Amino acid sequence: MLELVAQKITTAHQAIASTRESRDSDTKSSMGDKYETSREMAQQELNRLEGQLAQAKALQVDLQRIDPAKATQKGELGALIETNKGLFYLAIGWGKITLDGVTVFVLSPAAPLGKHLIGCRTGDAIAFNGQQWQVTSIR
């Protein structure tokens, strides 16, 4: 996950640099309104990209709080929880990833399902979205 977030940060930095270069190389023409509109659109794009960069950096900080060497017996930050519905990593809100052919859903403990998985133990049954989820292991 740290690698994926680092890639997202690198991509955001590159996009910001490219957008700034494009904005700054745009020369004022006799069509002043078009020039101002173009610069404003570039600035809006920069603002959006800088927001994405800030979010990615916040995710990186959240991930760095997790000790991957820590063994756990219950659902908590950093736990890999296997259920009859799939494999879930409680860390950050990221979504589905596939690693070595295995699908893992990376979700925040604050997500609706994450809230149900916090504190769970192997063998627990969890009711979520009108379905029964069985916790088969926690690593």
Image (cartoon, rainbow, N blue to C red):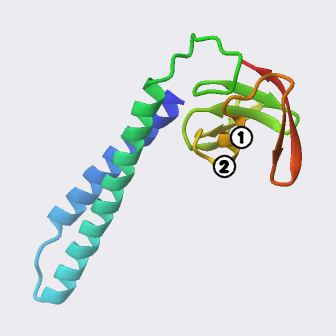
Residue 48 shown left or right of residue 30 in the figure? right
- Residue at image coords 31%, 45%: 13
Q: Is residue 93 above or below residue 24?
A: above
Q: Are marks 1 and 2 in contact (CB under 8 Å)?
A: yes
Local SS, label 1: helix
The amino acid marked with disc number 2 is Pro
**Residue 6 visible, this angle:** no
The amino acid marked with disc number 1 is His
Q: Is residue 114 above or below residue 80?
A: below
- Residue at image coords 17%, 80%: 36
Q: Which residue is identified by label 2?
A: 112
Q: Which residue is identified by label 1?
A: 116
Local SS, label 2: helix
Report, in whole angstroms, how far the alpha carbon at label 1 lies from the one at label 2: 7 Å
Q: Which of the two residues, 55 or 102, is positioned nearer the viewer here?
A: 55
Q: Is residue 92 above or below residue 20?
A: above
- Residue at image coords 70%, 45%: 113
